[in-house]
Amino acid sequence: MSVHKAFLFDLNGTMIDDMQYHIKAWHRILNELGATISLERTKEECYGKNHELLERIFPGRFTYEEKDRMSLEKEKQYQAEFRPHLKLIDGLDTFLKEAKDAGIKMAIGSAAIMYNIDFVLDGLNIRHYFDAIVSADDVTESKPNPETYLKCAAQLGIQPEQCIVFEDAPKGVEAAANANMDCVIITTMHTKEEFAAYNNAIGIIENYNDTFVQTLLQ
């Protein structure tokens, strides 16, 4: 019998394959603001809260309210472009149903704002699978700080070491490690070689049709 009692999912790049749309939206906005930033550099900066990304690129330039406004504008651009392609990563719909039937508690732990989380959960009608949601607005420290995943575990009433995190980004895997949680990696945006340093990775998959995920339900 598995020692794991909860599955914690990152959202973007882990449940839906949308990170290219986030990167392109940010790339457009950052360059319009004068950053002269490459698409590859934008990809590297696409982690944590929107406010943190803006502060990394433009330290001290914008007020909190201005960053709020630009964050929302970016998400509107992203949603408009991604909406026609909105779907779960292959195999995840079945996996969520099987996990729910098996009595495994599930949560979302994401650096996204609720505006984007609602876009996915309601757009795909999957909100009923999740017992807890921790968004960017619910934490003080972003990944790789473990706060996001520790709050998920606390809301579920499950010990951290009894949780499995599903992640697509190195900083997310690091956040899981810092929370003392095992991690399954989805290679939507990064190669498996980019995760070589993380000892908490128990599996690397391309999608949820991989037979490995079935072993997690046993």
Image (tube, grey):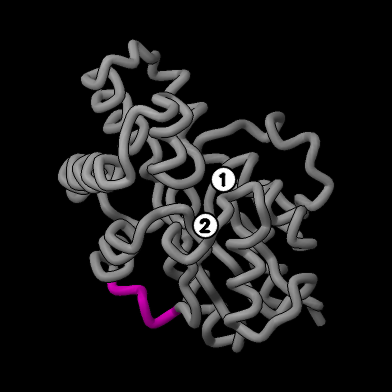
Instruction: Answer whether residue 127 is magenta in the image.
Output: yes
Q: Mark 1 points at which residue?
A: 168
Image quadrant where one finds the N terminus: bottom right
The front one of 210 and 186 is: 186
The front one of 147 and 164 is: 147
Of the residues shown, which amino acid type is indicated by label 2? Asp
Query: Against 117, is 81 above or below?
Result: above
Residue 23 is left or right of residue 215, and the answer is left
Q: Residue at x 36, y 76 (%)?
A: 127
What is the x, y in percent for residue 65? Answer: 26, 47
Main secondary structure along the magenta-highlighted residues: helix
Residue 82 in view, yes or no: no
Residue 7 is left or right of residue 37, and the answer is right
Q: Residue 10 carries which label?
A: 2
Q: Do the residues labelled 1 and 2 touch (CB within 8 Å)?
A: yes
What is the x, y in percent for residue 72? Answer: 23, 48
Q: Residue at x 19, y 40 (%)?
A: 77
Q: Residues within 10 Å of mark 1 (few under 14, many from 20)?
A: many
Image quadrant where one finds the C terminus: bottom right
Of the residues shown, which amino acid type is indicated by label 1? Asp
Q: Residue at x 56, y 51 (%)?
A: 142
Q: Give the range drawn in magenta.
A: 125-129
Instruction: Answer whether residue 167 is magenta in the image.
Output: no
What is the x, y in percent for residue 171? Answer: 63, 42
* Real-space CA distance between mark 1 and mark 2, rounded to the nearest whole angstrom: 8 Å
Q: Earlier in the sequence, mark 1 or mark 2?
A: 2
Q: Residues within 10 Å of mark 2 (few under 14, many from 20)?
A: many
